[in-house]
Image: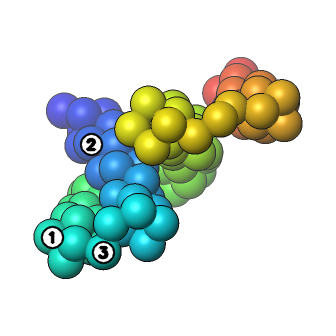
Amino acid sequence: MIWLVLVGALTATALAQVSYKAYFSRSRRPALLATALGLFVVAQLGFLVALTDLEVGVVYMSMGLVQVMVLVLAYTVLRERITPDHIVAVALIVGGLILYAA
């Protein structure tokens, strides 16, 4: 159950970042900004709950996945390009997480 809370917090953070960027780069609709801010609050609460049962290192390292999620969401929702630099960055993030887990 606690892992679902962590995944939910990670997802909320990624969605909040994409919503925030969409607000400032495309649409100045207040509802979009409110959604982003609300998701940031939900994410922080989720991280606090996750920290009650998981080690700080696990929660902290899992936050690297947010950057991967943001890249995928920005590509699908905001129609942003994925460059070779992005792919290298994702490989480094995933590689670091694998090394940490080992």
Identity of the residue drawn at 58% across and 40% down? 80
The structure's colour scheme is rainbow
Q: Mark 2 = which residue?
A: 8
| Front: mark 1 or 3 | 3
Q: Mark 3 = which residue?
A: 28
Measured as percent of width and height from the top left, residue 14 is found at 42, 49
Amino acid at circle 2: Gly
**For residue 92, side relative to residue 55 (left or right):** right
Q: Are marks 3 and 2 in contact (CB under 8 Å)?
A: no
Identity of the residue drawn at 68% across and 32% down? 82
The answer to which of marks 3 and 2 sits earlier in the sequence is 2
Query: What element does badge 2 sit on?
Result: helix
Q: Residues within 10 Å of mark 3 (few under 14, many from 20)?
A: few
Amino acid at circle 1: Ala
Q: Mark 1 = which residue?
A: 31
The relative height of residue 51 versus residue 84 in the rendered view (above or below) is below
Quadrant in the rendering for residue 46: bottom left
Kindly identify which numbered label has been placed on residue 84. none
Query: What element does badge 3 sit on?
Result: loop
| Front: mark 3 or 2 | 3
Measured as percent of width and height from the top left, residue 96 is found at 76, 34
The relative height of residue 59 versus residue 31 in the rendered view (above or below) is above
Identity of the residue drawn at 47% across and 66% down? 25
Measured as percent of width and height from the top left, residue 89 is found at 78, 37
| Front: mark 1 or 2 | 1
